[in-house]
Image (cartoon, rainbow, N blue to C red):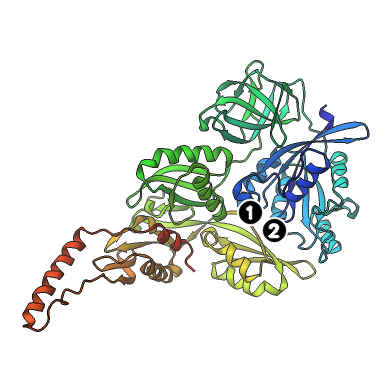
Amino acid sequence: MQKNIRNFCIIAHIDHGKSTLADRMLELTNTIKITEGQMLDDMELEKERGITIKSHAIQMEYKRGGETYVLNLIDTPGHVDFSYEVSRSIAACEGALLVVDATQGVQAQTISNLYMAIDHDLEIIPVINKCDMPNAMPEEVEDEIVDLIGCDREDILRASARTGMGVDEILNAVIDRIPAPSGDEEAPLQALIFDSVFNSFRGIIAYFKIVNGSIKSGAPVQFINTGKEYKADEIGVLKMDMVPTKELHCGDVGYIVSGIKTATEVKVGDTITTVENGCTEAIAGFEEVKPMVFAGVYPIESEDYENLRASLEKLQLNDASLTFMPESSVALGFGFRCGFLGLLHMEIVQERLDREFNMDVITTVPNVSYLVYDKQGEVKEVHNPAGMPDPTLIEHVEEPYIHASVITTATFIGPIMTLCLGKRGELLKQEYISGNRVEIQYAMPLGEIVIDFYDKLKSISKGYASFDYHQDGFRPSKLVKLDILLNGEPVDALSTLTHVDNAVDFGRRMCEKLKDLLPRQQFDIAIQAAIGGKIIARETVKQVRKDVLAKCYGGDVSRKRKLLEKQKKGKKRMKQIGNVQVPQKAFLAVLKLD
């Protein structure tokens, strides 16, 4: 029954209790027995870090007034690095629960996810969570929500996901306020793929939401973007496990197994239709992912290159915001240039490669993409410093800027402004939201916030500042390529693009850091930072020397001289053939250069 289906997601800032609220709903609708917290966060990493990384779809049945309602819930991550997961969940829903923590109020990520939901015309149900906490301030938070979405106070529900208070009212509000899916049961099949997973026994399993039409098990289907045809071997709905069914109708959320073995054949955002009387056009309105941070990922053993490619393809199925293309480096051999949404995303991908695919990788210094204009007026997009043309050919370079919004209490305005100005930020506006909470908006270069901005912001505001950003075009900038030379040889994996004002300081700190991390050799290692042909900083790792004079006691000085000359010749020969290995921890330490 299409009129009894409700598709909704939960959006909120990180740590506002989304996954706990999902647990309570699953318990109330008797979908599963809750044996431990956060049942939907089933990845080991999610349990360890206590954050949601993947969005999870699950179907619940709720009986009310003699009718059974089918509720499809998609639990979404709250961290800014996983906002693409949220955008895909929103595309598959008609409504959203906006969850706000009663002890913290509206945070930056809440606002950005909310705007995403409003752009897709979703029905918003505001919920204040953690109302049972002694330091809860529901009245103030209600004021903030009314200001934010302009609803009536009566529309805001108060709940506590931990104790289960108010969860019944939330389920009733979902049924009363969120509209049923509006699709045509008789039209040709149109189903939107919003996620996929790789199963080593069954191939690729795609999760979809039917917008129009219906699908039967065993029917021949076609994926519109790739044009490939398959047989729907099994279709079904997503409970805690997959439950096969014979047929799915308009408005349903389900999965399809069709024996697809090649990862590149399934694209998130693609449309599934039937081979006979299929629809002619794909579902519109699905945005492509824009990576924010780029880094090279290289296998430690060069023969693992093909395995790394296969692992990245399988990981991309499950994490559509990861993009990659092949590249090579003098120091590290063949690898991939990967695009991530942020530094946490990069860390998670590295962890998942290690745990799920047993791949040991080296990651280079993360950077962003720049536009380089040459003297002929042509534009080239550069993702890594090695791709920079010769400085004499460059007219100017443009770097990506972001529009950043920081929400904090008035106490921390000073330190936060100092931090943003240090990162070359320009203050756009500052306004009080409610009480002593302030929203500060800055225009900042993306390259400055990539590495450690978020960590620093959290520490200077004692965890009270929340941060969100979106891209805001490119602006001209004075950027230079900083090379690190070891004994006169550039190490391309350590090259970075940096602003002229920061170059000398950054180069000096990099040399000092490498001096501590490089193991001593039998010869002196000169570590130099250079811009073009100009050396701006130098450190030396002293050689390890054997005391060749130990066996000389007494006798003429010429005997000692002879031994020292012999040692000197050996050192010289060694320096010519010796090469310096840079350990993986040196690459990682350069990332966290503070």
At x 60% / y 31%, what residue is drawn? 205
Image-quadrant location for residue 278: top right
On screen, 231 above or below 349? above
For label 1, the residue is 80
Residue 383 in picture, x, y percent from top left? 44, 50
Residue 453 in picture, x, y percent from top left? 56, 64
Q: Is 178 left, or right, of 543 in this rendering? A: right
Residue 520 in picture, x, y percent from top left? 30, 67
Other residues around mark 2 within 10 Å, as few (<14) / some (14–19) / many (≥20)? many
Asked if one can make out residue 311 in the rendered structure from this viewpoint, the answer is yes
Could you give the CA–CA distance between mark 1 and mark 2, rounded to whole angstroms? 9 Å
Image-quadrant location for residue 268: top right
Question: Tag 2 or tag 1, which sits nearer the N-term?
Answer: 1
Mark 2 is on which residue type? Ala
Image-quadrant location for residue 541: bottom left
Q: Nearer the viewer, residue 501 or 63?
A: 63
Q: Quadrant of the N terminus?
A: top right
Asked if one can make out residue 280 in the rendered structure from this viewpoint, the answer is no
Label 1 SS: helix
On screen, 154 above or below 285? below
Residue at the outermost right position: 65
Q: Nearer the viewer, residue 477 or 377?
A: 477
Q: Nearer the viewer, residue 28 or 185?
A: 28
The answer to whether marks 1 and 2 mark residues whose Cβ atoms lie closer than 8 Å is yes
Residue 82 in picture, x, y percent from top left? 62, 49
Residue at the outermost top position: 276
For label 2, the residue is 108
Q: Is 72 left, or right, of 405 in this rendering? A: right
Q: Is 503 left, or right, of 269 in this rendering? A: left
Mark 1 is on which residue type? Val
Label 2 SS: helix
Other residues around mark 1 within 10 Å, as few (<14) / some (14–19) / many (≥20)? many
